[in-house]
């Protein structure tokens, strides 16, 4: 069976990470900074937005993949995927604007997916032991 739902969200997540990488590169070129942030707040925020996505996306996507392998409802997997992706987009968009309210919304969406994935994974594992 092809696991196309998690593959779909992994693809979109990869595009988001690439876009965030380009934002870091653009600011590095603008400020002529090869390593670190050179004290430039906009570069520091771009670096953190990129790093933050890389801190949360892999584990969430891995859990989505494993849940999809357990043949959970496609709608549930899509719900997790769209919530994760939108949370990461909202968070990334809020970083350079220094919009704490939107960052919190983005993180809450991400944490919701992580928590739901963890609870579903643990429950399924206990049921199938």
Image: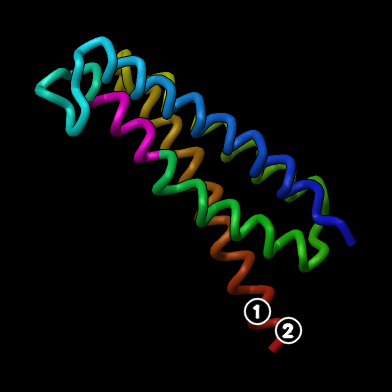
The quadrant of the image that shows the N terminus is bottom right
Residue 105: image location, x then y, percent: 43, 30
In this view, 1 is above or below 31: below
Mark 1 closeness class: few <14, some 14–19, many ≥20 residues within 10 Å: few
Identity of the residue drawn at 82% across and 64% down = 71
Identity of the residue drawn at 57% across and 40% down = 84
99 sits left or right of 13 in the view: left
Residue 32 tag number:
none
Mark 2–mark 1 contact, CB under 8 Å? yes
Element assignment for label 1:
helix
In this view, 28 is above or below 128: above
57 sits left or right of 32 in the view: right
- The region drawn magenta spans 44-52
Dominant SS in magenta: helix
Identity of the residue drawn at 77% across and 68% down = 70
In this view, 72 is above or below 124: above
Tally of numbered discs: 2
Residue 23: image location, x then y, percent: 39, 20
Residue lying furthest bottom in this view? 129
Colour treatment of the image: rainbow
Mark 2 closeness class: few <14, some 14–19, many ≥20 residues within 10 Å: few
Residue to which mark 2 is pinned: 128
Q: Which quadrant would residue 34 be assigned to in this image?
A: top left
Identity of the residue drawn at 86% across and 56% down = 2
55 sits left or right of 73 in the view: left
Please name whichever residue, 31 or 90, is drawn nearer the observer in this view of the structure.
31
Residue 125 tag number:
1
Please name whichever residue, 115 or 28, is drawn nearer the observer in this view of the structure.
28
Element assignment for label 2:
loop
Is 46 within the magenta?
A: yes
Give the distance between the C-alpha atoms of the residues marked 2 and 1, in whole angstroms: 5 Å
């Amino acid at each position: 069976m092809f696991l196309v739902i998690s593959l779909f969200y992994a693809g979109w997540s990869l595009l988001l990470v690439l876009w965030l990488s380009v934002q870091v590169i653009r600011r590095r070129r603008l400020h002529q900074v090869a390593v670190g942030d050179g004290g430039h707040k906009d570069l520091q925020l771009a670096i953190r937005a990129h790093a933050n996505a890389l801190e949360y996306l892999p584990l969430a996507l891995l859990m989505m993949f494993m849940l999809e392998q357990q043949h959970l409802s496609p709608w549930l997997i899509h719900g997790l995927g769209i919530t994760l992706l939108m949370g990461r987009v909202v968070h990334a968009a809020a970083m350079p604007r220094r919009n704490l309210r939107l960052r919190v919304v983005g993180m809450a969406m991400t944490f919701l997916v992580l928590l739901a994935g963890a609870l579903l994974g643990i429950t399924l594992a206990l049921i199938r032991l």
